[in-house]
Image (spheres, rainbow, N blue to C red):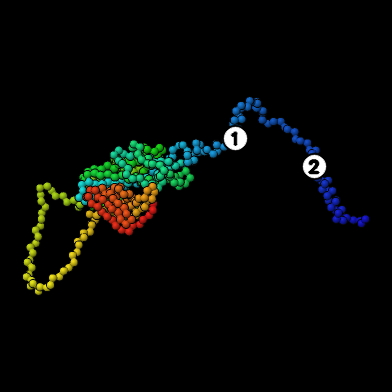
Amino acid sequence: MASGLNKERTLFLVGTALFVWVMLKSGLYWRRELEKPGAPKVPAVATQRGDPDIRSKLEVPSLAYYTERGPRDPFFPDASHPAGFYVRSTVSHTFYSPSRSTQCYVRSRYSFDCRMTPVPAREVRFLIPEGTTVTQVYSKEIDPKRLHGSQGRVYVVPVRPAAEKRTYYRCLITLTTQGTLDLPGKWSAPVITCTGAMPKVQSESGHLALAAPGKRVELAPVSDDPIQTGLTRVLEGQWPKDLARSSTKAVYRYAKPRYMLTVQLRHSASAVAVVPPGKAPKVTPAPKMTPAPKMTPAPKMGPKIEPKKLAITKPTAESGPPFKVMVIYRKDAPEPRRQVVLRHTETGEYYRKYEGETVLDGIKVARITDDGVVLFDSLRKKRFIIHGRFEQYDD
């Protein structure tokens, strides 16, 4: 047997040393005595009887507690409490009087920017004053599956507000009213508001504008005192862009929808020439004409026959309709029908009407075709035909 250490002996000695070291450590750990508890530093409290309902308090809630969040989560869309409402309004009253008429037509447009938090509202309610009728409602967020209409003095519009951010919703609603009055006379602005019809209206403010296109109607507010009217007049350079038009006469700002505005209306002096009774207007005599010199008759020529020309009188701005046709829509459901979009030549406002509906000033849409629109004026008993190549869309 060879003397000395080889590879196998070296591995055997190393393994034996490791085994002995592990056994020694284990023996020392097992033989270590446990520490004895010392004297308590805090006096012991008298033992009390436990709560008999502790089991019910430790039970895990059911699955419905986590899935049905509506009644307890204010950020859930179906929460029961009402939403906080913030309204910004833009109101415009436009006065227009046709030629040779003693009446004035008033068209009012109310635009409401409704913002709500933390939950959306399923409907927006407006308080309508007595004697005022809503003729048209427009909103991109209106719910087509539900009907809108009046409930006494409250007008209800079902909506599906758009989500701007978490717990922040918004919808835009426009209401239109129309009316007539005799000139001269006084007119009081009807106030349509959400306050009083909607719960939790935090604020409602906006701007009001008075407009009179053309030179037929003059208007003058009875009072501009902010204490009496609740309105503050805005300087012309600070008018909002939506109200800064050539026909705008005055713009006001209000902080609460409790304002009172009365306007005195009359015909413009430039549009109606008033002659005092019992006095005839002075007529300047025409200057005397100098007799023309005698002319030598020309030699007789053969008869010359010229074709007859038809004298066609083109309609003027006063006799023609004050509208232009912009677009024609074709609707297939629930039945085939057409709809026309008209633009007022003076005010620039748009009207979207079907056949048989009245646009303004007694003008009614009699017929709509692909290349023309027939309008009938019930006041002047005239029929107007507007021909052209209009843009057509399938709505």
Q: Earlier in the sequence, mark 1 or mark 2?
A: 2
**Mark 1 element type:** loop
Taking the spot 7% from the left edge, 63% from the top edge, the residue there is: 288
In the depicted view, which residue is nearer to us: 338 or 391?
338
| Three-letter amino acid code of the residue under disc 2 | Ser
Q: Is residue 85 left or right of residue 213?
A: right
In the depicted view, which residue is nearer to us: 141 or 373?
373
Residue 111 vertical position relative to residue 80 in the rendered view, above or below: below
Taking the spot 39% from the left edge, 48% from the top edge, the residue there is: 333
Local crowd size for mark 2, using a 10 Å CA cut-off: few (<14), some (14–19), many (≥20)? few
* Marking on residue 60: 1
Q: In which image quadrant can residue 43 be found?
A: top right
Where is residue 73? Give x, y as percent.
Answer: 50, 38
Q: Which residue is mark 2?
A: 26
**Mark 2 element type:** helix
Taking the spot 21% from the left edge, 48% from the top edge, the residue there is: 101
Where is residue 194? Give x, y as percent.
Answer: 37, 40
Q: Nearer the viewer, mark 1 or mark 2?
A: 1
| Contact, mark 1 vs mark 2 (Cβ under 8 Å) | no
Q: Do we see residue 336 in this rendering?
A: yes
Label 1 – label 2 distance at C-alpha: 45 Å
In the depicted view, which residue is nearer to us: 26 or 78?
78
| Three-letter amino acid code of the residue under disc 1 | Val
Q: Do we see residue 211 in this rendering?
A: no
Residue furthest to the bottom: 299
Local crowd size for mark 1, using a 10 Å CA cut-off: few (<14), some (14–19), many (≥20)? few
